[in-house]
Image (cartoon, grey):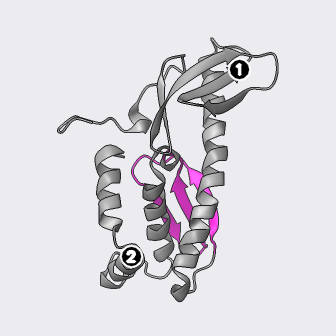
Amino acid sequence: MFKGQQITPEHERIFRYETGERHKYLGHLYTLSVLQTSGESRVYLQGENLVMEVSDPKNRAQKELVLDLWYRERAREVFVPILADAIVKAARYKLQLPKLRIYKMLDRWGSCSPKSKILILNLELIKVPQPCIEYIALHEMLHFKYPSHDFAFSSALGTLMPDWKEREDFLNTYYPI
């Protein structure tokens, strides 16, 4: 990254889902390889490549759907253990695992509803480095105890994750939303 370089948020990028295109996953850029298959559509990582096998490589909508489903599956696999770790880390606050929802959101990384015990994480988080996901998960989990960004919330976050500000700054700088 170059200083002063404008970074386009992922949800604003226009993808064609063609071989050679670059896609993010857990903070890394992978080169997309689109292959035709007569079997089930699938996506997998192979070295520095994100391989997508689909029945019709010319069908943009099919490729977009297949990749979206892959990101959603990976998000659930990655986010659930991170949330569980956040609960363990914040054990003194007696937090419980909320119902997790994963949505594409345009203006925030996460939100929570203490009344309904629902925590929402932005699907785009699956594209950022894991330490940033850990920060957002802990941040949102602490809102179940401290609904606002007051001193008690900031103090708890700082105690449990002393480098939270660096993680937040990195996220806002290199993965703007």
Q: What element carries label 2?
A: helix
Ranked by sequence position, the earlier of labels 1 and 2 is 1
Give the distance between the C-alpha atoms of the residues marked 1 and 2, in whole angstroms: 44 Å
Determine whether 20 is above or below 6 in the image: above
Determine whether 39 is above or below 131 in the image: above
Determine whether 95 is above or below 32 in the image: below
Residue at label 2?
157
Please, what is the three-letter code of the amino acid marked with disc 1? Val
Where residue 28 sits in the image (x, y, percent)? 46, 39
Q: Residues within 10 Å of mark 2 (few under 14, many from 20)?
A: many
Q: Front-most of 147 and 38?
A: 38
Q: Is mark 1 on a helix, strand or loop?
A: strand
Tell me which residue sits at (49%, 17%) in the image. 20
Are discs 1 and 2 less than 8 Å apart at CB? no
Residue 84 is labelled as none
Tell me where residue 62 sits by quadrant: top right
Residue at label 1?
54
Query: Is residue 27 in the magenta section?
Result: no
In the image: residue 157, left or right of residue 105: left
Determine whether 16 is above or below 136 in the image: above
Tell me where residue 46 sits by quadrant: top right
Q: Front-most of 99 and 42?
A: 42
Tell me which residue sits at (53%, 29%) in the image. 48
